[in-house]
Amino acid sequence: MDLFSEQYPLEFISFGSGSSGNCYVLRRGTACILIDLGIGIRAFKRYLYQYGLHPRHFVAAFVTHDHTDHVKAIGKFAIETGIPVYSTELVHEGMKRNKFMTRKVPEAQVRTLEVGQSVSVSGISITAFPVPHDSRDCVGYFVQAGNASLCIATDVGAPTDEIRQALRQANYIVLEANYDLPMLATGRYPQFLKDRIRGGHGHLSNEETAELLAQTIHAETKHIWLCHLSEENNTPQQALKTVRDHLDKRQVSLPEHLVIEALPRTRPIELCRLE
């Protein structure tokens, strides 16, 4: 049964953002789409019920990449609901090999998509674009429904033209601001891990995110969520300060009603209507 109705706006919820687990939900009407499920299944269901949602409301899932903090419970949820799970062929291969995924996505529910391919589910169009990261493969998603457009890029090793293009087309943005460079440099991480994080296939620093936004914010940008903040090498306050200071320094003309905030790492946010 099609649960979608065009009269409803697109809505966005983050249930977790960071190395402890990533999970985003899109809703239009009573139809829900899952993007990543790296938090525990019990916590996920508890959050759903708090929002008046139920697993039966989900019509599809999309996966960005095969790291455990993005896929931990996707197999179990797929088995319980029977929904199709979309991602690239390499991401599906990575999930099959991920030993921390105790339940795998059933073959009958595997849906392979190509970079640049758009999939429409219940009136929500989702297009994958490539993202450099040290996983088996990694994509971001550009989402459109009605007048709303949303770009999600959570684990970004380096800025690319494809990411810039998606950001310039989006009214709403979920973009990684993983680490503060001085905090990482002086922190307790071993050198090999520091090198991996800032090596071009790891994560974006606050400074890199700030410059990427300076290049792509436009008159129709309405809301920016900084995501995947490191617990060890960043704080919401530092990420926001770096971004705002850099935009001011670059004299970027910001839309009057633009909101910039950092997503919590381990708790849900209020449901946000994208209009």
Image: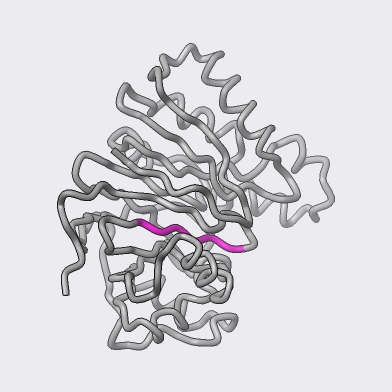
Magenta residues, start to end:
21-26
In-image side of 17 versus 273 (left or right): right
The answer to whether 114 appears left or right of 209 in the picture is: left
**Looking at the picture, how far across and down is residue 239, in whole percent?**
63, 34
The residue closer to the viewer here, 177 or 148, is 148
Instruction: Please give the count of numbered marks on the rendered protein.
Output: 0
The residue at 69%/37% (across/down) is: 180
Magenta-colored stretch includes residue 24: yes
Q: In the figure, residue 61 lies in which quadrant?
A: bottom left
Residue at 46%, 40% in the rendered image: 159
Question: Which residue is drawn at the image coordinates 46% and 32% (left, top)?
Answer: 212
Along the line of sight, which residue is nearer the eye, 100 or 240? 240
Give the quarter of the figure containing the N terminus: bottom left
The quadrant in which residue 187 appears is top right
Specify the quadrant that holds the C terminus: top left
Whether the magenta-drawn stretch holds residue 209 is answered as: no
* Residue visible at 30% across and 82% down in the picture: 109
> Residue 29 sits in which quadrant?
bottom left
- Looking at the image, residue 59 lies above or below residue 207: below
